[in-house]
Amino acid sequence: MTEQEEKQFTAVMQLIVPQVIDCMIKVYGVDAADALRQLYQSQLYADLERESSKLWHLSPLTLAELWHSEKNTGHIQYPEEA
């Protein structure tokens, strides 16, 4: 990945993570501090951090749903388009 691509990916992550946290709060009633901690500790976030996973293409709501699934089942079933 070029330096420019890395900067663009960092910018995307800085935009999408707060939106995912917001969905976790609104949809699942998670406290803001807990949502942040739980997201950053999740396998979903580890995968999201890898640009090559293309998970950043998914909507914040879909990402929140994947986080919720991981939390409840310990497993993530990524959609085909990811």
Image (spheres, rainbow, N blue to C red):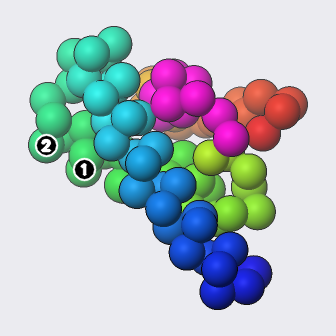
State yes or no: discs 1 and 2 in contact (Cβ < 8 Å).
Answer: yes
- Residue type indicated by callout 1: Arg
- Residue type indicated by callout 2: Ala
Residue 38 figure quarter: top left
Residue 1 figure quarter: bottom right
Q: Residue 7 location, x and y as percent?
A: 55, 75
In this rendering, the count of numbered labels is 2
Residue sitting nearer the eye, 8 or 21: 8
Kind of element beneath mark 2: helix
Q: Residues within 10 Å of mark 1 (few under 14, many from 20)?
A: few
Picture residue at 48% right of the left edge, 62% below the top = 11
Indicate left or right for 38 with 33 as reference. Answer: right
Q: Residues within 10 Å of mark 2 (few under 14, many from 20)?
A: few
Kind of element beneath mark 1: helix
Residue sitting nearer the eye, 5 or 72: 5
- Residue 7 shows in the view: yes
Residue sitting nearer the eye, 32 or 59: 59
Q: Which residues are magenta?
A: 57-67
Residue 52 figure quarter: bottom right
Q: Residue 34 location, x and y as percent?
A: 18, 40
CA gap between label 1 and label 2 equals 6 Å
Picture residue at 62% right of the left edge, 46% below the top = 56
Residue tagged 1 = 37
State whether residue 79 is above or below residue 9: above
Picture residue at 64% right of the left edge, 86% below the top = 3
State whether residue 49 is above or below residue 60: below
- Residue 69 shows in the view: no
In the rendered image, residue 60 lying in the magenta stretch gets the answer yes
Residue tagged 2 = 33
Quadrant placement of the C terminus: top right
Dot label at residue 9: none
In the rendered image, residue 59 lying in the magenta stretch gets the answer yes
